[in-house]
């Protein structure tokens, strides 16, 4: 697929694998446990970074900054922003009711939910890709370790997060590959979705966390304030890279492909744990990882063959 696509996938997996570590640094190391406030700063940093890029392209290359119509903003961009905030909120809240292992198991079905959403939206999809998607979901479930604490509320929250996350990537794919593809590239799309996401998440933060995040920052002095600012900066940078890389991967591989790549991060995370922390990996986990990698490989081959067949069909029609 070319080095650009490979680089985007690697950045996406790297950002996914390190996101929890950067969040842990803020929440645990600095005892700054205001998830919604931190999420709002992620969206704000993404909007600022993308605005800088858009202004640079306008000044240096004469590329106009795309402005959505009210219909595009209300019917596509706002729903994407709502889907992002709801999926994040539901996913984080689910951890209160059930174990991390249980949320990972439910989260493993995300690629299958994405297939259903793509089909419901009437978007083109090769049904043969269901096979590798099932393999990836099954491999992730097999490789999940830890105490499985069942909770019906947790199940509802996890599937809510899956549905809205799937809707998000499906709508993003439609924006970047459909009739608006010439207007919304990943940078422009991230900017126009980050702004409403920031406002929505900031509203949630003020409603549930109040002014406590600001009071907490106000009580810090000297070295403590500097280190918190550094951790927040690293976390925001990681989140911006994650969101931008995810859009590039979605544009190149599609909504389902991006979700399969996201599931493959579990292999990298465990390998990192083995190298850095000396963690042990069981045989059943290794089997699960092999199944995940096999599913991702099958997806790539089937999709590539499908695109070749489509290109050949178009060439025959133009003869």
Image (spheres, helix red, strand yellow):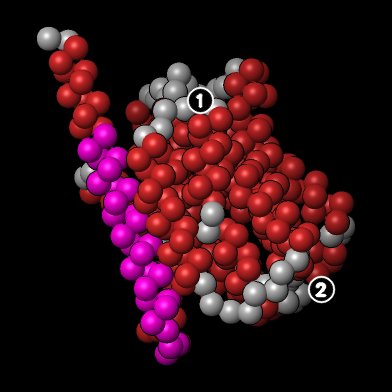
Residue 232 lies in the magenta-colored region: no
Q: Which residues are magenta?
A: 278-306
Residue 91 coordinates in the image, percent (x, y):
67, 57
Q: Residue at x 42, y 84 (%)?
A: 282
Front residue of 94 and 236? 94
Q: Which mark is residue 21?
A: none
Give the labeled residue for mark 1.
122
Q: Which mark is residue 219?
A: 2
SS type, badge 1: loop
Quadrant containing the N terminus is top left
Front residue of 307 and 268? 307
Most prominent secondary structure in the magenta stretch? helix
Q: Residue at x 61, y 30 (%)?
A: 77
Q: Are marks 1 and 2 in contact (CB under 8 Å)?
A: no
- In this image, 281 relative to 310: left or right? right
- In this image, 218 relative to 140: left or right? right
Looking at the image, can residue 64 be seen?
no
Q: Residue at x 35, y 28 (%)?
A: 61
Q: Residue furthest top?
A: 319
Residue 72 coordinates in the image, percent (x, y):
60, 21
SS type, badge 2: helix
Residue 302 lies in the magenta-colored region: yes
Q: Vertically, is 9 above or below 180?
A: below
């Amino acid at each position: 697929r070319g080095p650009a696509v490979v680089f985007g996938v690697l950045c996406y997996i790297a950002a996914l694998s390190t996101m929890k570590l950067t969040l842990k640094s803020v929440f645990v190391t600095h005892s700054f446990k205001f998830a919604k406030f931190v999420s709002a700063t992620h969206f704000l940093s993404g909007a600022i970074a993308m605005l800088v890029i858009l202004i640079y392209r306008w000044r240096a290359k004469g590329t106009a900054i795309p402005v959505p119509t009210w219909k595009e903003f209300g019917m596509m961009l706002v729903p994407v922003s709502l889907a992002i905030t709801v999926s994040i909120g539901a996913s984080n809240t689910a951890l209160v009711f059930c174990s991390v292992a249980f949320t990972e198991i439910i989260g493993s079905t995300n690629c299958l939910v994405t297939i259903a959403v793509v089909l419901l939206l009437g978007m083109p999809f090769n049904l043969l890709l269901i096979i590798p998607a099932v393999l990836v979901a099954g491999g992730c479930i097999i490789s999940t370790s830890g105490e499985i604490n069942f909770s019906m509320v947790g199940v509802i929250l996890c599937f809510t997060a899956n549905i809205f996350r799937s809707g998000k990537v499906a709508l993003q794919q439609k924006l970047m590959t459909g009739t608006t593809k010439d207007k919304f590239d990943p940078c422009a799309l991230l900017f126009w979705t980050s702004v409403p996401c920031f406002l929505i998440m900031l509203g949630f933060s003020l409603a549930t966390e109040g002014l406590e995040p600001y009071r907490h920052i106000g009580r810090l002095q000297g070295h403590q304030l500097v280190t918190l600012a550094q951790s927040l900066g690293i976390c925001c940078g990681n989140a911006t890279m994650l969101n931008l890389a995810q859009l590039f991967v979605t544009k190149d591989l599609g909504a389902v492909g991006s979700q399969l790549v996201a599931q493959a991060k579990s292999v990298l995370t465990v390998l990192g744990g083995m190298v850095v922390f000396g963690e042990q990996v069981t045989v059943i986990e290794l089997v699960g990882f092999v199944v995940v990698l096999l599913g991702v490989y099958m997806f790539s081959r089937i999709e590539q063959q499908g695109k070749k067949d489509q290109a050949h069909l178009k060439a025959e029609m133009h003869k």
